[in-house]
Image (spheres, rainbow, N blue to C red):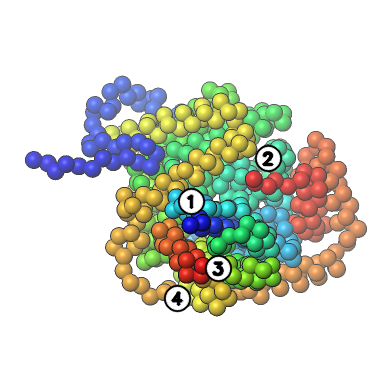
Amino acid sequence: MRKIRVLIAKPGLDGHDRGAKVIAQALRDAGMEVIYTGIRQTPEQIAKAAVEEDVDVVGLSCLSGAHNELFPRVVECLKEMGGGDIPVIGGGIIPHEDRAYLKEKGIKAIFGPGSLTADVVKVIQELVWKEG
Amino acid sequence: MEKEEKKVVLDSGIEVKTVYGPQDFLGFDYKEKLGEPGQYPYTRGIQPNMYRGKLWTMRQYAGFGTARETNARFRYLLEQGQMGLSVAFDLPTQIGYDSDHELARGEVGKVGVAVDSLLDMEELFAGIPLDKVSTSMTINAPAAVLLAMYIAVAKKQGIDPQNLSGTIQNDILKEYVARGTYIFPPEPSMRIITDIFAFCKKEVPKWNTISISGYHIREAGSTAVQELAFTLANGIAYVEAAIKAGLTVDEFAPRLSFFFNAHLNFFEEIAKFRAARRIWAKIMKERFGAQNPKSLLLRFHTQTAGCTLTAQQPKVNLLRVAFQALMAVLGGTQSLHTNSYDEALCLPTDESALLALRTQQVIAYEIGVTDTVDPLGGSYYLESLTDALEEKVWEYLQKIDDMGGAVESVKNGFMRREIEKSSYEYQRAIEKGEKTVIGVNRFVIEEEPPRDLLRVNPEIEKVQREKLQKLRANRDNERVEKTLERIREVAQSKDNLIYPILEAVEAYATLGEICGALREVFGEYHQD
């Protein structure tokens, strides 16, 4: 079976990448291939990388409060670039009351502070194996 | 018979013994290891009487939305007994973009206040006499521009810059390592910093020109030892850069300050602060030959560890913060920010910010820990731990020296890799249950989602954009263009950049325009 490929990205200007890097390492330890884009990526750049790298899942991380603006734009950009079938998940400082909105905009799962990496692994596996 | 006990190893790799006693004090030289408070090597504090003479500055970090909203929060906190201001800027401001820049979308006013021009800075400090407060600004890559704006506001208030006191963070090396709000490559960034040292020595002599910051290194996941080692290594790099730029060490060293994190292990953190003072005093005396006793003092601000706060059972964060604040005070801090309990969820509300300030006031006025200086000094455990931490920090400093210094170790990724390794180990320890986080991996309860969180009005991006359009239409654009041209010229020379930046600021050139002019000359840094 092909390894699950995941793009981990940080949209916006926020430079706090501890969470993104911890998740990237945990996914690798769980046997996935992970591409990390680094900080300060635009939604366009993230979507382009996801399509070019033919990933199964995109994981976004944002702590600056710009998630309502940036996460849905990644989903839109993916659709425009022919990657509309790639599921997007997100994490960071995301108030509970924003979660319904983000789900409505196509974000499949949200992980706040204190989330366990094992849960992220599980959700990604379910997303890929269910859709695939 | 006693039960078999668990081995205890701190995150720093130091193994803790069951009990400490006189056997751990053999050969302990009081004068060499501790000395009196206010005397070399300053382990017990930088002042002979510490908090009996003057309490630490209660300085709560605040800022969100527009300058007007943040001004209201500042006045509220000052009325409640806060002693100094501490400004949080939004990310576009920290990276030198105006609020109408494409990359600013969604970020305007979110993690701090949006400042595009002197106009915003005037509103931010409206009604606050700048000769009566000290202001700390968390600004790094564009620190020169924000400092110039602050000076310009003071001048408008009729205040001589010689009477201004405060701090700009201005620590670019940790941005490449841990926080990510850099603009230019390391070399021109270091030049801007030494230009600020030279400018302030002459024009704003009471200003702390840099706050060499371990806080963010720790938040990025380092251990206590790494926090100290990397911060002090960065400090050495700034001192070397300033000396290379022609300053003598005693000219600028008294205005260096530091910024540390108060994390979770009570004694390890207190020992860290005490070790930091001792190591820095030795570095300044023995390595740089500083003569002025003030050059040897490690003065520091502390913030409680944001990364230890949980979104689960958020009120438990009040307790974490109170203990961490106590560590900072027992460690001899000069200034303190206590986090608000809701920060793993959103920005603090007025109510949570007030509770955070009250936490400091309880420690200062009610529980007696300020009655005497360094009350834990001489504790077998604490002194052993201080020594053990110091030893491990010197090992790292040697390693960084061997690779050519902090700038080199930033460029080759050494510090980042070390921090990533520690942060991953920390997370694994939580997930394996070796480390307890209440509400996360133990004592978990079902919870209602929290309500009444602070939300930044999404309209403010539009407000800032319109304000910028109006500014550009109403100012003397010819004058602005001239000042920007002057910045480009000086950037290419060896002259001090801060003077032309101040001229541009006073002509109402925007932050984005000034940083743009510097970008043209210096280029931008990109992480691989």
- Going by the numbered disc 4, the residue's amino acid type is Arg
- Going by the numbered disc 1, the residue's amino acid type is Arg
**Residue B238 vs residue B360, the one in the foreground:** B238
Q: Secondary structure at mark 2?
A: helix
Q: Which residue is mark 1?
A: A28
Chain containing the residue with disc 4: B
Q: Residue at x 33, y 59 (%)?
A: B441
Question: How many labels sit on residues?
Answer: 4
Q: Which residue is mark 3?
A: A87
Spatial CA span between label 2 and label 1: 31 Å
- Sequence order check: which comes first, mark 2 or mark 4? 2
Chain containing the residue with disc 3: A
Q: Residue at x 86, y 43 (%)?
A: B489
Q: Quadrant of residue B95?
A: bottom right
Q: Is residue B241 toward the left or the right of residue B484 in the image?
A: left
Q: Which residue is mark 4?
A: B451
State which mark lies toward you, 4 or 1: 1
Chain containing the residue with disc 1: A
Q: Secondary structure at mark 3?
A: loop
